[in-house]
Amino acid sequence: MKKLKYILPVLFAFTIFIACSDDDDVDTTPPVIEIVSPDDHAHFHPGETIHLHAIITDDTELATWKIDIHYNSDGHTHSQIITLKHGDHDHHHGEKEWHLHKDGLIEGNVKVYELELDLIVPEDAKHGEYHLGVFAVDKAGNQSQVFIEIEVEDDDHDHHEHEHEHEH
Amino acid sequence: MRIIVIILFALQTVHIFSQDRYHIAGLVLDENNMPVPGSYVQTDKEQSVTDDNGRFVFNQITAGQIQLSVSFMGYETFDTLLMVNEHKHLRIRLTPDNIHLHEVKVRGNNMQTAPGLNRDIIYADQLERQFNGTLVRSLERQSGFNAMDIGAAASKPVIRGMGFNRVVVVNNGLKQEGQQWGADHGLEIDPFLSEQVEIIKGAASLEHGSDAIGGILEISNRRPPTEGISGSFHLLGKTVNETVGGSLLLQGRQNRLFFKSRITLIEYGDYRVPTDSIVYLTRNIPIHNRKLKNSAGHDYNLFFQTGYLGEFWRTSMTATRVWQKSGFFPGAHGIPDLRRVEDDGNSRNIDMPYQNVEHLSITSNTTIHTPHSSLMLDLGVQNNHRQERAEFHTHFGNQPPPQTNPDLELDFNLTTYSANGRWNYRFTPIHAITSGIQTQWQKNKTNGYAFLLPDYERTSAGGFIKYEYEPGRRWKFNGGIRYDLISLKTEGYFDPILQQYMINQGRDAETADFYARRSFETDRQFNNYSWLIGATWNATQSLNLSMNLGESFRAPTAIELGANGVHHGSFRHELGDPLLTPERGFFTDITLNYKTDTRQISVSPYFYHFSNYIFLRPSGEWSHLPHTGQIFRFSESEAIMSGVEFSYFEEFHSEWQIEINAEWLYNQQIAQENNAAYPLPFSPPANGFIELTRLVRSATNDLPLRISLNSRVASSQNRIARNEKTTPGYILLGSAISVPFKISGLNSELNITGHNLLNKRYYNHISFYRNLEIPEPGRNIQLLLKIEF
């Protein structure tokens, strides 16, 4: 047991040594994105302009942004629901799924960035639900993204409010 | 190499000089012809302890009569009188006495007969009491060991904060493949099958080569049954996901021939989470009825073994087959969508998306024991087949659905042939040498409308030599080196649909080609060595200190070299680097062990240095693939890793037991530029487990009734890699009651266990579901009934 006297301090010193490594001075906080407009579930007609306004903030320094709009066709199990919802319409008059990708750099040491873009819904955009995503990355590579849903609908469709299945 | 030559020469001389006297070499076996390590051997003048292979050697015996005795707890002492007039080679078979072997086995942990790495051995009966769904989860209480869970029914092992390809799972002597695929599927092992599980912590590349940087989970079920027909039946029920399961073991032995067979069927429904909604990518996703939709599944297992026990040898053939099918929660598969999580009114159906995993393995194990040598030959073939099915969907408008199997998203089919040989030779009581070779050949074929992993072919061959030196009872030394040759050929894959899509999107030809090259063709050769030296010092009968020092490596995988595309599980664009070099880690650890009959304390600090730890680094460049954010590149970085493991066990007055295990770990990249000293991803927080057990012994039963209360504690994890989420700490409460009883003379045991009794909502930092903000399962009451016959 006498030997313990020697062993324990050695173990202890070893532990202290490894515990006392420098504390991290690293950035792991991702940017915060707020989509001011359009509203979630907003409706648009082909040819209309979507005014996108997003406020991106980061605790250190922003680097880049990206937006991505795509047709919600890959929703696995719910593709049928969409078909049913529009079952009484015929949507096959040369429409194309609208896909949009834009990105840009945020130059200078910027912590708050206002992203404002006017996006025109193509005349031949396929009707239905789209995902609109805003992505941002800070200088360190921390990424965040926010998605909203928008709907592209027929010209003869009035702008009346749909009953949505879910409240937010 | 020169060292070994010298050692061999030294051993040779010992041999020459002992010619004028005689030696006695012995092999101690139990009633099943299995070697008995750690038995006490005594002559009139000397005493010794049998080594790992149950052998002992006495040199320098002068001619004449000598008294020899061998004793081991649980067995009758063997006594004999020997006439020594030549070299003697003995085979000694011990007979069990009628005290319960059981009791001895239960806490036979840390047998440390040879110097070596930090290891914990857990036997079947202990595993049963700790049973928690999967084998890996059942072991989670061990310090330095964590479970990377995917819901309630699948998990992977993590040792010292390292998982996937940094931990090797060895099943009956052969490396189990397939568990390193993605974080979203678990280990393909029947949770009831293991008779003995050994957790080896520390870089153990010496015997298994590449990948064993973090440690090894070694599973074996090669114990021959007792004479005649016997078996057991398990019945399992769990409330958290309404599991119903059963396992039947039927085994028999007639003299030297034996067989064992097991069938296990487990079915489970969607698991309960203590929350009404989760927040995924800033969207609030409801969890209807507090059940995680489509997390149901089943797990069917078959096992058959037959073997023969010879005088000096034993051989067995084992075949196992595993079928696992489990659903994925659709609400967090890609972009959040509320309609997918609507209650379908059935909590037991497995809907798309789901995965189907099949595993088949056939192994042959042969061991030959002689008083000097022990020879092992393990041969095996295994096939891992994993399929993910989801209704056809594409991110590229121009991709047509496949003609056949339209729902098959991913299909991996990996076939592995392995052959391992090992030879251990004991010259004298103080010198032993082990050498071995391992070879493996693998082929992976892929299929499905999505692409993730390329087809590849991998061959590996390695050889090692290890030397053990034990100058006295106090000190033991060991050292070894290993050399490996690994060749990996991955096939390139060019996706013309994606190329067209990119061009349609207005990208230039070069960009389109870059994205369409989903996998680079590579042909790499990795030659690497590893080494390990260790020493154990037995300070007193109950106190020992061991230290290890070594270097280990891991060859890059096909994904790390050749990936280019969205990993749909993590929803990231991952880009491989065909020029990666094998990851090398230097490690050292110290283990202090204190052990008496009723108390066991172990403290083990460790330290690793990686010259090039391979991980996914965010690049800050946007991917042009739809729905994705930035590209994550497989990159190398210098890194350090360290921690301390602590475990304590004590029994008071044969009535109370207390067990405390704790672990703390720290890791960090070494910054080369722009202050990137980030922690490594998937690091478990400091965590601990404490259990208090009351034992009630009765005259009618051999085994005591056990009532336990336990708690699992984890601190918050705030040291995160980029794009990980900090995870709050938690305290969970659990309990267990184990009642042994007899049903018409049959030994039976009822185990009722409670997990997360307070139904706490918590996250496992290293879980696949953590990043998707899905909490761990809620309160679970589990019932496990065992009847032995």
Image: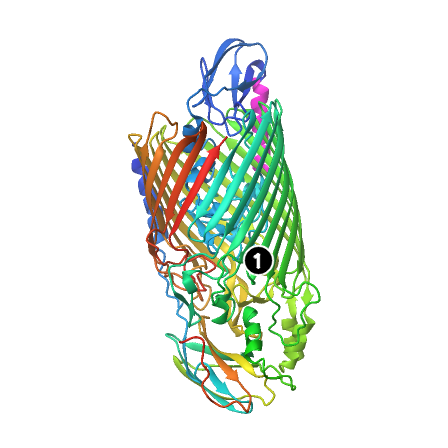
Answer with the quarter of the image where residue B573 lies: bottom right
Left or right relative to B305: residue B743: left
Q: Main secondary structure of the magenta part?
A: helix
Q: Of residues B121 and B338, which is closer to you in this image?
A: B338
Which residue is at the front of the view, B167 or A107? B167
Place of residue B594 in the rendered image (x, y in percent of width and height, measured from the top left): 35, 34
Q: Nearer the viewer, residue B4 or B341?
A: B341
Q: Residue at left 53%, top 67%?
A: B572
Element assignment for label 1? strand
Quarter of the image with the N terminus of chain B is top right
The answer to whether A49 is drawn above or below residue B672 in the figure is: below
> Badge 1 sits on which subunit?
B
Write down the residue under mark 1: B355
Residue B366 shows in the view = no
Residue B200 part of the magenta segment: no
Q: Quadrant of residue B600?
A: top left
| Visible residue check, residue B534 | yes
Q: Is B137 situated above or below B105?
A: below
Q: How many marks?
A: 1
Tell me residue B278's x, y (percent).
41, 66
Residue segment shown in magenta: B1-18
User: Which quadrant holds residue A57?
Assistant: bottom left
Q: Residue at x 45, y 18 (%)?
A: B76
Q: Position of residue B366 (x, y in %)?
A: 63, 32
Q: Residues within 10 Å of mark 1 (few under 14, many from 20)?
A: many
What is the three-letter code of the residue carrying label 1? Gln
